[in-house]
């Protein structure tokens, strides 16, 4: 695949469409009937597991092990969980979400200075994928790199509001720390050496990038999606949701479960690279976002990824005669070209890699 260098069509900011007050959404945002939000939704009382991360540093071994077990079960059964007592200050998580909300309410001139291209995706964007005529999602976003440091460039982060860069720095540092802690927990839970996954991700040289999603109010929420069904291509995703407006749905047994965020919690999910490294023991789970007519929604998806030029393959220790390697070796750079070209497409990428039996 060659590098997709520019958008196939002029970019329309969904926020501008929403603010125009039109009661009808353009055809480009109307999903085929089977993809629309109303079908196959689960009862409201189901939620993804909630895990108290302070259990991992508890001196009481029973508590420590029970927490590891909760993480293990959540990775195997759900691919998604919510964490509290994760070590990030409450003011920081609220502050960073609200400063990004302010950014999206800056004037269009301020935002357009950072308009992105599919070459790197960095900056202010309104679509994922470069296929001409594709049906689009009801959202805008901002994408930036934190690690590796060689890719971090504060000039590509918004200059306004004035404390944004500082807050994003602090938030990023904490998320990377949380990523390191969870990689160790995953390694232990999979029966690997405690630093196996960290090393497989490149040790100190992991990647970390942030996608801030802005879902404007939508006059016809039953016809579209804020973000189409996909699994995350990377390692682990840390999602800071909007506490007041739900929207994230996780696929489970052919049904969609709407996640109910807990206060100051962070939603964690397994990405495709962990599915590959664990040889399919952990699965990256499909998810999508629905929108609504009365409220905008802001979320921060932090992607904690392997160093992009390392070969990622199933851990030899998780390969047995009964469980041969399910996926070929590939670098994350090669892997993510798919979503960057085709846009969100459920789990079709990782599924297509499966070795024929
Ligand atoms: C993502 C994502 C969910 C959300 O950005 O990959 O799944 O709730 N976001 O915004
Ligand atoms: Ni996602």
Image: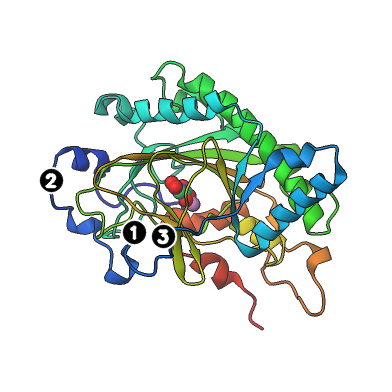
Residue matched to label 3? 342
Question: Could you say whether the residue bearing mark 1 is in a helix, strand or loop?
Answer: loop
Q: CA distance from mark 1 to mark 3?
A: 6 Å
Whether residue 72 is visible to the viewer of this picture, yes or no, is yes
> Circle 1: is it few (<14), some (14-19), or many (20+) Cα within 10 Å?
some
Quarter of the image for residue 105 reads: top left
Mark carried by residue 131: 1
Residue matched to label 2? 22
Q: Residue at x 32, y 48 (%)?
A: 7
Of residues 193 and 311, the one drawn nearer to the viewer in this rendering: 193
Mark carried by residue 182: none
Question: Could you say whether the residue bearing mark 3 is in a helix, strand or loop?
Answer: helix
Question: Could you say whether the residue bearing mark 2 is in a helix, strand or loop?
Answer: loop
Q: Relative to 268, is 15 on the left or the right? A: left
Q: Earlier in the sequence, mark 2 or mark 1?
A: 2
Q: Earlier in the sequence, mark 1 or mark 3?
A: 1
Say which of marks 2 and 3 sits in front.
2
**x, y (%) of residue 92?**
54, 25
Q: Residue at x 29, y 52 (%)?
A: 8
**x, y (%) of residue 69?**
75, 55
Q: Residue at x 85, y 41 (%)?
A: 60
Q: Name the residue at the bottom extreme.
A: 357
Tag 1–tag 3 contact (CB < 8 Å): yes
Q: Residue at x 21, y 38 (%)?
A: 16
Q: CA distance from mark 2 to mark 1?
A: 26 Å
Quarter of the image for residue 176 reads: top right
């Amino acid at each position: 695949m060659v590098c997709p260098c520019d958008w196939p069509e002029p970019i329309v900011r969904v926020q501008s469409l929403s603010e125009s007050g039109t009661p009808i959404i353009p055809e480009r945002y109307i999903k085929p009937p089977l993809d629309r939000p109303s079908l196959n939704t689960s009862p409201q009382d189901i939620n993804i597991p909630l895990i108290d991360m302070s259990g991992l540093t508890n001196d009481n071994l029973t508590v420590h092990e029970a927490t590891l077990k909760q993480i293990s079960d959540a990775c195997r059964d759900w691919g998604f969980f919510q964490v509290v007592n994760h070590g990030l200050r409450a003011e920081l998580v609220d502050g960073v979400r609200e400063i990004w909300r302010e950014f999206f309410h800056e004037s269009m001139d301020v935002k357009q200075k950072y308009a992105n291209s599919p070459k790197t995706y960095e900056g202010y964007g309104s679509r994922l994928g470069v296929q001409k005529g594709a049906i689009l999602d009801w959202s805008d976003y901002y994408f930036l790199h934190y690690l590796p440091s060689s890719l971090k460039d504060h000039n590509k982060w918004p200059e306004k509001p004035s404390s944004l860069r500082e807050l994003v720095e602090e938030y990023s540092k904490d998320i990377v720390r949380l990523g390191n802690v969870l990689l160790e927990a995953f390694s232990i839970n999979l029966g690997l050496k405690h630093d196996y996954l960290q090393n497989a991700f490149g040790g100190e040289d992991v990647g970390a990038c942030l996608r801030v999603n802005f879902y404007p109010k939508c006059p016809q929420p039953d016809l579209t999606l804020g973000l189409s069904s996909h699994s995350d291509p990377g390692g682990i995703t840390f999602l800071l949701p909007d506490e007041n407006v739900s929207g994230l749905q996780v696929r489970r047994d052919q049904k969609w479960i709407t996640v109910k965020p807990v206060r100051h919690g962070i939603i964690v999910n397994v990405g495709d690279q962990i599915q590959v490294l664990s040889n399919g023991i952990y699965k990256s789970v499909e998810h999508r976002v629905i929108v609504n007519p009365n409220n905008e929604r802001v979320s921060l998806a932090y992607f904690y990824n392997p160093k992009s030029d390392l070969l990622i393959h199933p851990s030899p220790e998780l390969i047995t005669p009964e469980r041969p390697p399910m996926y070929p070796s590939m670098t994350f750079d090669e892997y993510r070209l798919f979503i960057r070209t085709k846009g969100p497409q459920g789990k079709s990428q990782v599924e297509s890699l499966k070795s024929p039996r």
